[in-house]
Amino acid sequence: MKFRKPRFRRGFFFCFRLLLIQPLQAKAMRLLLILAISVGLSACTAPSREFRDLPAQRITVDGSVFDVRVRGERAEAVRVNTQYAPRFGPIRERAGRAMAQASGCQVKEVLGDQALALGVLDCD
């Protein structure tokens, strides 16, 4: 005759795990997910270190929305709207126009990527 463990013990531990441990894990995972999303979203439009203390001007050019900050002969444009697979060529031109609007100067050069563009200004 084979020895069998009583069913109530297996059922008890299963219920214990289901009722106590899994909800705690689910709460922890939800908390980590919310924390990761909030940190990720707050970093999306954060300015670079050099432009951190400056106020932003929100400027819209041809459907692209930028937060523009100007410091001396340089400007930074952070694109804050969503666009599907934008290329940097059109975004560069729009960011340059946004920088020119915010600073009142001509833009010599624009470098960067689709999310953040840095411009060199010519304020003569």
Image: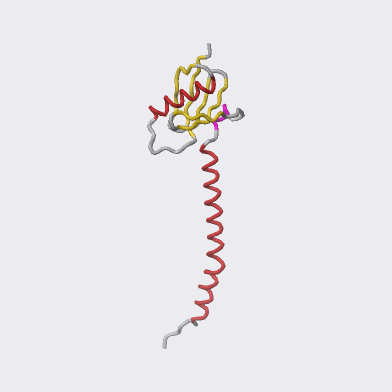
Instruction: Tally the marks.
Output: 0
Nearest to the observer: residue 97 or residue 76: 97
Name the residue at 60% across, 27% down.
54
Residue toward you, 35 or 107: 107
User: Which residue is at a point 39% across and 28% down the rendered structure image?
Assistant: 90
Residue 35 in the image: above or below residue 66: below
Does the magenta stretch mainly form a helix, a strand or a loop? helix
Which residue is situated farthest in the bottom direction here?
Answer: 1
Looking at the picture, does residue 98 appear above or below residue 1?
A: above
Looking at the image, residue 73 lies above or below residue 40? above
Vertical order, 73 against 83 (above or below): above
| Residue 120 position in % (x across, y down) | 49, 19
Report the quarter where the N terminus lies: bottom left
Q: Nearer the viewer, residue 92 or 19?
A: 92
Q: Quadrant of residue 39?
A: top right
State which region is magenta: 47-51
Q: Which of 31 and 92 is in front in this view?
A: 92
Give the image's coloring scheme.
secondary structure
Residue drawn at 38 percent across, 37 percent down: 85
Percent across and percent down for residue 67 are: 53, 31
Q: Residue at x 51, y 29 (%)?
A: 59
Q: Position of residue 91 (x, y in %)?
A: 42, 29
25 within the magenta span? no
Which percent across, then down, holds residue 101? 51, 22
**Outermost residue toward the top in this view:** 124
